[in-house]
Image (cartoon, helix red, strand yellow):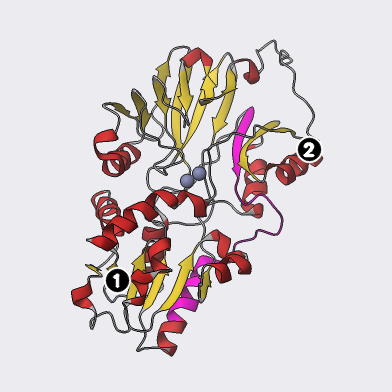
Amino acid sequence: MAPALHPQPLPSGRPHPDRWIKVQPEGLYVEPGGFYIDPVRPVERAVVTHGHSDHARPGNRHVLATPATLAIMAQRMGEAAPASTQPLEYGEPIRIGDVLVRLAPAGHVLGSAQVVLEHAGSRVVVSGDYKRRLDRTCAPFEPVPCDVFVTEATFGLPVFRHPPDLGEVEKLLHSMALFPERSHVVGAYALGKCQRVITLLRAAGYDRPIYLHGALEPLCALYGRFGVELGELRPATVAAREELRGALVLAPPAAATDRWARRLSDPVVAMASGWMRVRQRARQRGVELPLVISDHADWDELTQTLEDVGAPEVWVTHGREEALVHHATRRGIRARALALIGFEEEDLEEAAVSGEGAREKGA
Ligand SMILES: [Zn+2]
Ligand SMILES: [Zn+2]
């Protein structure tokens, strides 16, 4: 059990951050600033960490986020995108009410940010989703020393240790060399994972065109506009069936494992997800070639990050909180689970895009 926290002044007389950051039904509320971070219900004022659909939801009146996150929201939400937006670059401080706010890179997807909050002599960092390994599609995670570090724990169990990504991509290239007549279809979430897989393939020397399911094209184009080099991409249309023999095709996870992929010539179905570490999940989805490529910190990255930020107190927002709370407590860090609801595991985040995928199939 985590030690219960009671509102109490810090030694210097500063109010404890749990006096001014509160868990409400809408989400994490920063009271002296009058705003929520990644609210799960519509609010007046939101700060959004990144564009995944469980963090960036429609219906908020005013949204502050990085320029890339705002562009992603505009593209994904269309008419439902917030009318009133405020772009904030990484590292640029801004005062909201009685809180000094800045955004720091989270290394999760393009535009992803940690929210650094300073109020009444304390600094709190809300990290959103993050990872620590190299990703050419976004700025790397910046550890910010703080009094309270608020972290996710999607892969917060010691069994979750993601292998090196380049090794996973080499498995894919090896399979392509072994079966040159077969198409290889890789299921990859549209925002972040898709572009990361492409940059990993390019880094491994794969320079042929890569074919995309229609649902993946708009975000790849957006990444391109933000300066992320993806090489030659082509639409994976029915007309290109012959061309797709022996080719590499990326599709949303739902499309990769259904009828859509079977139109291709004897496809090898691969899937890029942190959950591919769990063999049973791969089997359930009919994945022949599981690739353990995640945009979330694994156990070692989570625990290393606690060391790097050096916070004497940690709040765990969602995921597998218990093991991380236990680990932190053993390290002498005060820790508690916030048990925020409405945040989903990577696989479930895909639901929104599966919808897009379903529409694309008809087109
Ligand atoms: Zn995310
Ligand atoms: Zn998330």
- 215 to 20, vertically: above or below: below
Q: Quadrant of the C terminus?
A: bottom left
Secondary structure category for the residue under label 1: strand
Give neighbour class at mark 1: few <14, some 14-19, many 20+ (Cα, 10 Å). Answer: many
- Percent of width and height locating residue 60: 37, 26
The residue pinned by badge 2 equals: 329
- 152 to 197, vertically: above or below: above
In three-dimensional space, the C-alpha distance between marks 2 and 1, rounded to whole angstroms, equals 47 Å
The image quarter containing residue 148 is top right
- 176 to 254, vertically: above or below: below
Q: What range of the chain is rendered magenta?
A: 147-173
User: Which of these two is toward me, 117 or 81?
Assistant: 81
Secondary structure category for the residue under label 2: helix
- Percent of width and height locating residue 62: 34, 23
Q: Is residue 107 located in the magenta-colored stretch of the structure?
A: no
Q: Give the residue type that dot 1 points to.
A: Ile
- Percent of width and height locating residue 123: 58, 24
The residue pinned by badge 1 equals: 210
Q: Is residue 160 located in the magenta-colored stretch of the structure?
A: yes
Q: Identify the residue at image location x=41%, y=47%.
A: 139
Left/right placement of residue 230 relative to residue 142 reads left
